[in-house]
Image: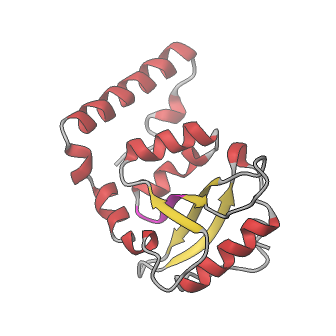
Amino acid sequence: MFDRSRYFDKIRDYKKLKNFHDSLADQYRLMESSGLEKDSSYHKFVNKYGSLEEKGNYDGPIEVQLLRTMSDFMREGHIMMSSQAQYGAKVSQGIYLVARLLDNSKGVDAKEARRFTIGFTVDRYGFLEFDQLKEYKNQQASDRVKEHVRKWLEAKDITYDVRTTDIR
């Protein structure tokens, strides 16, 4: 397991940081190209929640796509220009789940965001609780999207705190 205080926090100059980053990137590329990433503990953890991608008894416009590999997780953070990298340790420990959320509503203003990142905390029994919903550059979702997400969470029987800014 990666111990941030043992490795990362001791880096004090740019060259060492770049070398550390490049080394990690090489390791992930190797894992991905050899198919090892699909057998990783992260992949197994995420696959437990495959039901989130199924419509089930939800008939609204929300679609959730799990980020099944660490590469998917890192790529999503880059595309959305979000701070989800700070959750990497929690994700790798199996106590936090991050997914892509798409709003497939019809007749919506083209300027309104359609792609979001959704995060869940995972309790010790494996149950999910909604934590956050962010659009590009960590911006808040519109009230319309929040309403759809609340209905999706209820259909999936995922708890959420109505006082959470990202969902109220």
Q: Nearer the viewer, residue 154 or 60?
A: 60
Q: Position of residue 155 (x, y in %)?
A: 56, 85
Q: Which residue is painted at 47% across and 51% down in the image?
A: 89
Q: Main secondary structure of the magenta part?
A: strand
Q: Determine whether, in the image, residue 144 is placed left or right of residue 124.
A: right
The answer to which quarter of the image holds residue 146 is bottom right
Q: Which residue is painted at 34% across and 49% down in the image?
A: 1
Q: Which residue is painted at 54% across and 81% down in the image?
A: 58
Q: Nearer the viewer, residue 109 or 113?
A: 109
Q: Is residue 89 above or below residue 146?
A: above
Residue 22 shows in this picture: yes
Q: Is residue 157 above or below residue 37?
A: below
The answer to which quarter of the image holds residue 157 is bottom right
Residue 97 colored in magenta in the image: yes
Q: Is residue 27 above or below residue 12?
A: below
Highlighted magenta segment, given as a residue range: 94-100
Q: Which residue is painted at 49% across and 34% down in the image?
A: 8
Q: How is the image coloured?
A: secondary structure
Image quadrant containing the C terminus: bottom right
Q: Position of residue 88 (x, y in %)?
A: 49, 49
